[in-house]
Image (cartoon, rainbow, N blue to C red):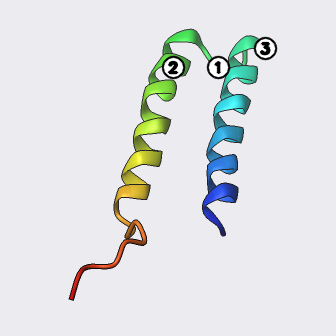
Amino acid sequence: MTQITQSLCWAGMLIALALANRAGLIADKSATTLFAVIPALWVASRASRPCGLRKAA
């Protein structure tokens, strides 16, 4: 998967969470926690991969 498609998946997850919260399927307290945790997971999963920069020889 390219970086754009991965980012779209993460964004789709946040939008789905917002819609589920708006529809009352997820409680406000749980949604608030997930809105903090999901971006943190995204950053942590991106930090474990190389950024594409090569080290100088």
* Residue type, mark 3 in image: Ala
In the image shown, does 46 or 56 lie closer to the viewer? 56
Extreme-left residue of the structure: 57
In the displayed structure, 8 sits above or below 20; it is below
Query: In which quadrant of the rendered image does the C terminus lie?
Result: bottom left
Task: Work out whether mark 3 precedes mark 2 in sequence or the reverse, and give the earlier one.
Answer: 3
Mark 2, secondary structure of its residue: helix
Q: Describe residue 20's horizontal placement relative to residue 55 as left or right.
A: right
In the displayed structure, 56 sits above or below 18; it is below
Question: Which residue is the site of mark 1?
Answer: 26
Residue 3 spot, x, y in % from top left: 60, 61
In the image shown, does 27 or 7 lie closer to the viewer? 7
Question: Which residue is the site of mark 2?
Answer: 30
Question: Which residue is the site of mark 3?
Answer: 23
Residue 44 spot, x, y in % from top left: 37, 51
In the displayed structure, 4 sits above or below 2; it is above
Q: CA distance from mark 3 to mark 2?
A: 14 Å
Q: What's the residue at 47%, 47% (across, down)?
A: 42
Q: CA distance from mark 2 to mark 1?
A: 7 Å
Q: CA distance from mark 1 to mark 3?
A: 8 Å
Contact, mark 2 vs mark 1 (Cβ under 8 Å): yes
Q: What's the residue at 62%, 45% (across, down)?
A: 10
Q: What's the residue at 68%, 21% (across, down)?
A: 18
